[in-house]
C-alpha cells in the first residue's frame, strides 16, 4: 500500500503558486482549485493537502502531521523549527526590511519596533547592539509609525507599494526571502521512496525553468 504524503500549504498567494508548481510536476491539485471552505483534501495520487495559516506551516511539519510544507523563509526564520529545508522555490520573493519615516534614525537609543516577526527583530537589533521594545502586531504593521505606536517596523517588503502609500521607506535591508519546501525529519527517512523523487523532480523542474 502506497504511503500518503501530506502537504501543509501556506494559505493565500503562496499556496496558489505552490499549486501551479506542483501541477507542472504532474501532481494533481485540482481539488484545491474548487471554491470551498474545506481545509483538507485527499487525492487519488496518494497526496493529502492541508491549507493552513502561513505561520502554522512549520508547526504542522515539525509535529509530523504534515510531511512537507511550502512556506516563506521569513516564517521559517521566525518559527525556527528543526525542519529540513530542501528547496528554494523562487516565488514569493521579497525582502525583510526595517522601515520607517525617512527622517528616523536607527541610531536612536531606544527604538520601538512594530512587527509580525518578534524573533527576527530581536536578533537583528541585538546584533546591532541596540536596545529595542518589540510591539507584536499581526498585520497592517505599517500603521505603527503612522499612529505613533512604534518608531519603525520590521516587515517583508515586496513591491514597496504599501510603504510608499503610507509615506514610509526602507531604512535598512536585512535579507532576501522566498518560498521554501521543507520536510519533516522523520518523514524524509520513513517516506523516502515517495518524498525523495518528488523533491528531486521539483529541483530539476526549477533548474530547467530558471535556465
Ligand atoms: C505584506 C507585508 C506588507 C506588504 C508588503 O502584508 O506585511 O504589509 O505585504 O508588500 P508590498 O511591498 O508589495 O506593498 P500582507 O499583504 O501579507 O498583509 P498584512 O499586512 O495583513 O500582513
Image: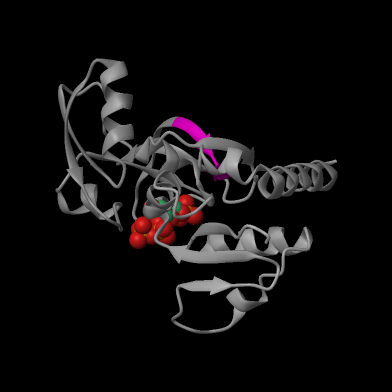
Which residue: 69% across, 50% down?
194
Of 109 and 91, the residue lying toward us:
91
**Farthest-out residue, front:** 1
Q: Is residue 98 visible?
A: no
Quadrant where the image shows the C terminus: top right
| Quarter of the figure with residue 110 | top left
Residue at x 45%, y 31% (from the top left corner): 173
Q: Ligand 1 is located in which of the four quadrants?
A: bottom left
Give the percent coordinates (x, y) of residue 11: 47, 64
Residue lying farthest to the bottom in this orientation: 35
Question: Quadrant of the image for the N terminus?
Answer: bottom right
166 or 5, which lies in front?
A: 5
- Indicate whether 84 appears above or below 116: above
Percent across and percent down for residue 9 are 51, 59
In the displayed structure, does residue 4 sit left or right of residue 79?
right
The residue shown at (62%, 78%) is: 31
Toward the viewer: 127 or 107?
Answer: 127
The vertical placement of 152 against 38, above or below, is: above
In the rendered structure, which segment of residues is drawn in magenta? Answer: 174-183
- Is 8 drawn above or below residue 81 in the view shown? below
* Image height of 47 relative to 184, above or below: below
140 vs 208, left or right, is left
Residue 58 horizontal/vertical position (percent): 42, 47
- Asked if the stretch drawn in magenta spans residue 181, the answer is yes
Amino acid at each position: 500500500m502506497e504511503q500518503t504524503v501530506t502537504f501543509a500549504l501556506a494559505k493565500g498567494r503562496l499556496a496558489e503558486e505552490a499549486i501551479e508548481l506542483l501541477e507542472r510536476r504532474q501532481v494533481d491539485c485540482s481539488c484545491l482549485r474548487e471554491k470551498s471552505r474545506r481545509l483538507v483534501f485527499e487525492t487519488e495520487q496518494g497526496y493529502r493537502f492541508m491549507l493552513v495559516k502561513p505561520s502554522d506551516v512549520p508547526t504542522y511539519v515539525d509535529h509530523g502531521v504534515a510531511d512537507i510544507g511550502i512556506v516563506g523563509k521569513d516564517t521559517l526564520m521566525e518559527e525556527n523549527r528543526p525542519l529540513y529545508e530542501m528547496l528554494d522555490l523562487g516565488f514569493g520573493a521579497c525582502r525583510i526590511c526595517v522601515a520607517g519615516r525617512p527622517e528616523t534614525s536607527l541610531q536612536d537609543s531606544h527604538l520601538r519596533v512594530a512587527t509580525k516577526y518578534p524573533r527576527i527583530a530581536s536578533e537583528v537589533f541585538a546584533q546591532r547592539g541596540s536596545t529595542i521594545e518589540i510591539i507584536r502586531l499581526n498585520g497592517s504593521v505599517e500603521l505603527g509609525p503612522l499612529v505613533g505606536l512604534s518608531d519603525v517596523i520590521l516587515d517583508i517588503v515586496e513591491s514597496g507599494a504599501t510603504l510608499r502609500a503610507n509615506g514610509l521607506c526602507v531604512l535598512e535591508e536585512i535579507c532576501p526571502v522566498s518560498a521554501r519546501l521543507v520536510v519533516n525529519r522523520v518523514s524524509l527517512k520513513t517516506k523516502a521512496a515517495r518524498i525523495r523523487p518528488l523533491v528531486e523532480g521539483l529541483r530539476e523542474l526549477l533548474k530547467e525553468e530558471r535556465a
